[in-house]
Amino acid sequence: MKIRKKIEESLKNQRRRYMKKNSKSKNLKKILNFLRNKNKKKKKQKKKEKKQLKIKENKLKEEEEKGYSKRILYSLYKFYKNYYFKSQKSYILLYLDNRKNQENNRKENSKSIKGFRGKLMKKKQQRRSKLEKKKKAMEIQSKIIEKEKKEEEYLRILESEKKNNMNMKEELESKSQENKENSCIKNKNKLKCKRENRQKKIFRGRKKRIKKQSQKKNLNKK
């Protein structure tokens, strides 16, 4: 039986050692796999970025080959929207193919546009600026009033606290004086009692001595 127990214990110890070794190796494998997967992800991201750059470059090349990029078309669309209008006398037409004609038309018609819309825009801007200034002034005044109210409330609170503290100090001082007086009276009474007790003890002792002395005298006479 003893030999069997020893064998079982040795087998258990061997299993534990084996599990410890394998656990370390498993952890190392996990770390290596994690790092490999990380590097793979980075490589995939780089490949995707390269593909996206190539696609963007191809798109830009195609737009340039057509003749107008998206930005130029958008700027021309803005110009067309802002400065194209109809009147009884003339019609301003813009052509995307001839940029020089567009610039000339813009320079020629800028003066008439300023007279037609510039004044209205200036008036609107002036009104808006006045309203904004008024709003800002009102906001500043309201903030100042709120600050003053808060300061007044704070000062009132401080004054009330000071008064309360003074009253508390006076009450404490009065109580301390009363306690001192009472303690003095108690101490005086204690001293008086002690003195009286001492005197009583002394008087009793004298009486006893006198009695003893009288008894001794009587015995000696007999």
Image (spheres, helix red, strand yellow):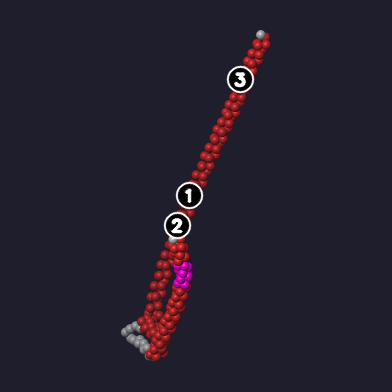
Residue at the far top in the pictured view:
222
**Is residue 82 inside the magenta stretch?**
no
Report x, y in % for residue 69.
40, 86
**Is residue 19 inside the magenta stretch?**
yes
Report x, y in % for residue 186.
56, 31
Where, quadrant-wise, is the C terminus in this rendering? top right
| SS at mark 2 in the image | helix
Indicate which label's residue lies in the foreground, 2 or 3.
3
Residues drawn in magenta:
14-26
Report x, y in % for residue 29.
45, 74
Distance between the Cα atoms at labels 1 and 2? 16 Å
Whether 33 is drawn above or below 207: the answer is: below
Q: Find disc 2 in the rendering and name its residue.
A: 146
Q: Find disc 3 in the rendering and name its residue.
A: 204
Instruction: Confirm whether residue 10 shows in the render.
Output: yes
Distance between the Cα atoms at labels 2 and 3? 86 Å
Residue 211 — which label?
none
- Residue 112 vs residue 219: left or right? left
Badge 2 density bin: few <14, some 14–19, many ≥20, Cα 10 Å: few
Where, quadrant-wise, is the N terminus in this rendering? bottom left
Residue kind at label 1, given as amino acid type: Ile
Q: Find disc 1 in the rendering and name its residue.
A: 157
Distance between the Cα atoms at labels 3 and 1? 69 Å
